[in-house]
Amino acid sequence: MSDLNESVIESAKAAQEIAKTTGKAIDATREAGSFIAKFVAGPIEEGMGIFEDKLKYMRWERQVRLMQRASELLRRLGIDRPTKPVPLKVALPLLEAASLEDDDFLQDRWVALLVNAGNAASGIEIKRVYISILEQLSALEVKILDAIYALPFPESRQGGIVTTNLPESAHIETKDEQDDKRDEPQDEIKLALANLERVGCLRLGLTWGGGGSFRRINPTILGLRFVQACRT
């Protein structure tokens, strides 16, 4: 078989795959339109239009806010535009995730990440992993990180951090504190701490039996650098 024939066959296969994907997207949109139409007592086309228009508006609204907040932050830093280029492999996923974030508190962290990436004076090198981490965090988890990394890193890394009052506050464990005498945090905080450990932003303390303890945690260098990258 000639190289030309092989190329034609490969192109045909690629076109088929694109058609399949497009067909699935159309089917999904039609299904969503049908679902909405049942509630608005209108035709499927009307439901599809409502669905598509709402998604477009929400995306546009979040993009506008992202641009406004980034411009405000740049002005506060004394610059009117980015002072270094952001690599496309970082910029594209960052901008996409930031424009999809519907929580203002979390989107402001995306704004800080974006501005730091484009600010030569920030001294921060944005890693792809920071984008992946922020996409997986809730507002509660980010507030917990704020409390943890507000403490001196060398001391807290060595002594461990007490989780009793998270997310409002945290303190470095003292020598006279007994870990097994403290109350464990609420389940919501436990789940948040477990997720933060999963993404590498902290380590759970250990019990005498070697299991994980939610009463005390230790910060990590990845957690520290991530928090620094998402704040200005």
Image: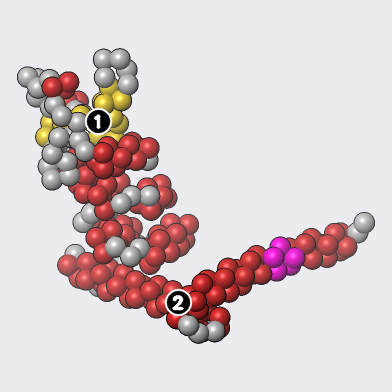
Name the residue at 28% across, 58% down: 106
| Magenta region, residue range | 15-20
Q: Earlier in the sequence, mark 1 or mark 2?
A: 2
Can you say which quadrant of the picture contains the C terminus? Answer: bottom left
Crowd band around label 2 with a 10 angstrom C-alpha radius: few (<14), some (14–19), many (20+): few
Label 1 sits on residue: 214
Q: Please, is residue 112 above or below residue 62 in the view?
A: above
Q: Please, is residue 77 above or below residue 47 in the view?
A: above
**In 3D space, how far apart are the residues under numbered discs 1 and 2 (Cα atoms)?**
45 Å
Q: Is residue 141 visible?
A: yes
Q: Secondary structure at mark 2?
A: helix
Name the residue at 83% across, 65% down: 8
Name the residue at 24% across, 49% down: 140
Q: Quadrant of residue 60?
A: bottom left
Q: Position of residue 226 (x, y in %)?
A: 30, 46
Residue type (three-letter) at the residue carrying disc 1: Phe
Q: Main secondary structure of the magenta part?
A: helix
Q: Quadrant of residue 203?
A: top left
Label 2 sits on residue: 39
Q: Secondary structure at mark 1?
A: strand
Residue type (three-letter) at the residue carrying disc 2: Phe
Name the residue at 26% across, 38% down: 187
